[in-house]
C-alpha cells in the first residue's frame, strides 16, 4: 500500500517534486571570471587528441579507433550537475565530472572510429534550469553557452582550416549546438565543412528550428551535411514533461513550436519515418550492475518514429532501470541503446562527405593509395 501511495503521489505531483529537488533556491549570479575554463590548457577538456586516459577513446571488443582520422569531432556533453546550490556547475565538482566521463565513454566514443574527439568542460546549467522557465534559468543557460562558444573557437583554432567537422551532443549539449549552428555556422563557409550534426536528446522542430540551422534534416542513410535528432521512449510512452515545454516554446525562426512535429531520425536505419526490428540493432551498451563498465548487446531493442516525433523502442528493456525518467523516457540512454548503429551511421556519412569533397576518394587512406599508384 505504501508503494502504491508513493506511485500515485509521484504521478500526480512529479513536476512539483522534481522542482523541489532540483531547482536552485537562490538567484542566479554570474560565476567569477577567475573560474572560467582556459581552453588552451589540457585540463579544460573532457577529451582532446593526445590526452592521457581519454574517456572518449573507449571501445568495446571488436572495435578500433581511427589512427589517422579525417574528421574533427566537437562533442558537447549533457547535463551532469544535479545539485541545487548553484545555477551553473563548478568545474571541480567531483560527482558531475565522474558522470561526464561516463557520458563521454558511452556517447562520444561512438565517433572515435571516424574522428579525433574534442569535448570541452563547460560550466553547464544545473538540471533544475530545465524544470522552470524564468530569468534565472535563462541566464544560467546563456552563461553555459558562452563557455561552449569559446571552446568552439579554440577548437577551430587547433584544427586545419579545411578539416571536416562532425558535431555531436546530447540533451543540454545539443541545445547549445543548436544555438551554435544558428548563430555561428548557418550561412557561413563553415557550414560546408559539417559532416553531420547529431543533436540527440533535445526536441528539434522540423518546421520552426531546422530552417534556421543552415543544414537540412537527414532524409536517408549515409547522407552528409545534415541534422539528426531523436528522443527515446519505451511503450507506453508518456512524453508530457517534454511536450509541455516544447509546446510553450518558440523555435529558432521565431515561430511557436506547438503543433509542429519533432525531428526523429531512426538511429537504426539512419532515416526518418522508418521502423526497424530489434534484429537490425547492431549493439546496445548495457550498464553492468557492479561497475561503470558496459557490455555491447546486439538485437536488444527495435525502434520506430511515431507521428509526434518520438522514437519508440517497444517494451522497457532490461538493464537500464535505475536511470529511466518518468513516462518511460530513456533519455539517459539515447546513445547507449543504439551505440553500434550510431557508429556505423557516422562512418557512412563521413564516407559520403569525403567522397563528395575529394571527387570519389573516400578517405585519407584512399588518397594515399591513389598517390602510390601514380608513383
Image (cartoon, rainbow, N blue to C red):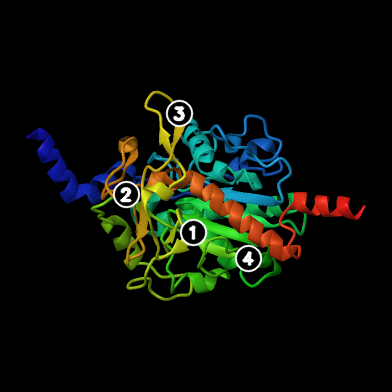
Labels 1 & 3 near each other (Cβ < 8 A): no
Tag 3 secondary structure: loop
Q: Nearer the viewer, mark 1 or mark 2?
A: 1
Real-space Cα distance between discs 1 and 2?
21 Å
Q: Nearer the viewer, mark 4 or mark 1?
A: 1
Q: Residue at x 57, y 69 (%)?
A: 215
Q: Which mark is residue 185?
A: 4
Q: Residue at x 49, y 59 (%)?
A: 270
Q: Which mark is residue 221?
A: none
Disc on the earlier residue, 1 or 3: 1
Quadrant of the image occupied by residue 288:
top left
Disc on the earlier residue, 3 or 4: 4
Disc on the earlier residue, 1 or 2: 1
Q: As displayed, is residue 192 above or below residue 267?
A: below
Disc on the earlier residue, 4 or 1: 4
Residue 291 seen in this snapshot: yes
Q: Badge 3: few (under 14), some or many (20 or more) residues near its Cα, within 10 Å?
A: few
Real-space Cα distance between discs 1 and 3?
29 Å
* Furthest residue in direction top, as rendered: 290
Q: Which residue is mark 2?
A: 329
Q: Which residue is mark 1?
A: 270
Tag 1 secondary structure: loop
Q: As displayed, is residue 298 above or below residue 52?
A: below
Labels 1 & 2 near each other (Cβ < 8 A): no
Give x and y (percent) for residue 69: 71, 46
Q: Residue at x 44, y 73 (%)?
A: 208
Q: Badge 4: few (under 14), some or many (20 or more) residues near its Cα, within 10 Å?
A: some
Tag 4 secondary structure: helix
Real-space Cα distance between discs 4 and 2?
31 Å
Give x and y (percent) for residue 58: 57, 34
Q: Which residue is mark 3?
A: 292
Q: Quadrant of the N terminus?
A: top left
Amino acid at each position: 500500500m505504501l508503494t502504491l501511495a508513493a506511485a500515485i503521489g509521484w504521478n500526480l505531483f512529479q513536476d512539483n517534486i522534481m522542482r523541489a529537488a532540483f531547482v536552485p533556491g537562490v538567484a542566479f549570479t554570474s560565476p567569477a571570471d577567475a573560474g572560467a575554463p582556459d581552453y588552451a590548457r589540457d585540463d579544460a577538456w573532457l577529451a582532446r587528441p593526445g590526452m592521457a586516459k581519454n574517456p572518449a577513446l573507449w571501445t568495446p571488443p571488436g572495435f578500433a579507433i581511427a589512427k589517422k582520422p579525417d574528421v574533427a569531432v566537437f562533442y558537447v556533453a549533457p547535463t551532469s550537475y544535479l545539485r541545487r546550490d548553484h545555477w551553473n556547475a563548478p568545474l571541480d565538482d567531483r560527482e558531475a565530472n565522474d558522470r561526464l566521463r561516463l557520458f563521454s565513454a558511452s556517447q562520444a566514443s561512438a565517433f572515435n572510429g571516424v574522428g579525433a574527439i574534442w569535448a570541452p568542460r563547460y560550466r553547464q546549467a544545473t538540471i533544475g534550469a530545465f524544470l522552470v522557465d524564468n530569468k534565472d534559468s535563462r541566464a544560467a543557460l546563456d552563461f553555459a553557452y558562452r563557455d561552449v562558444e569559446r571552446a568552439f573557437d579554440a577548437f577551430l583554432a587547433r584544427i586545419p582550416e579545411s578539416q571536416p567537422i562532425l558535431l555531436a551532443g546530447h540533451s543540454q549539449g545539443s541545445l547549445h549546438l543548436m544555438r551554435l549552428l544558428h548563430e555561428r555556422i548557418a550561412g557561413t563557409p563553415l557550414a560546408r565543412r559539417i559532416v553531420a550534426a547529431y543533436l540527440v536528446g533535445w526536441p528539434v522542430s522540423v518546421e520552426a528550428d531546422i530552417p534556421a540551422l543552415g543544414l537540412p534534416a537527414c532524409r536517408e542513410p549515409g547522407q552528409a551535411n545534415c541534422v539528426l535528432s531523436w528522443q527515446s521512449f519505451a511503450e507506453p510512452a508518456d512524453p508530457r514533461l517534454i511536450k509541455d515545454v516544447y509546446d510553450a516554446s518558440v523555435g529558432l525562426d521565431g515561430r511557436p513550436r506547438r503543433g509542429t512535429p519533432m525531428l526523429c531520425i531512426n538511429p537504426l536505419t539512419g532515416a526518418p519515418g522508418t521502423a526497424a526490428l530489434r534484429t537490425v540493432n547492431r549493439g546496445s551498451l548495457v550498464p553492468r550492475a557492479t561497475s561503470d563498465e558496459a557490455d555491447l548487446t546486439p538485437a536488444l531493442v527495435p525502434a520506430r518514429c511515431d507521428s509526434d516525433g518520438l522514437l519508440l523502442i517497444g517494451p522497457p528493456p532490461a538493464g537500464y532501470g535505475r536511470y529511466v525518467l518518468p513516462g518511460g523516457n530513456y533519455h539517459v540512454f539515447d546513445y547507449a541503446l543504439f551505440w553500434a548503429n550510431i557508429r556505423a551511421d557516422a562512418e557512412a556519412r563521413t564516407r559520403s562527405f569525403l567522397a563528395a569533397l575529394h571527387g570519389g576518394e573516400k578517405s585519407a587512406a584512399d588518397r594515399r593509395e591513389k598517390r602510390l599508384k601514380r608513383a
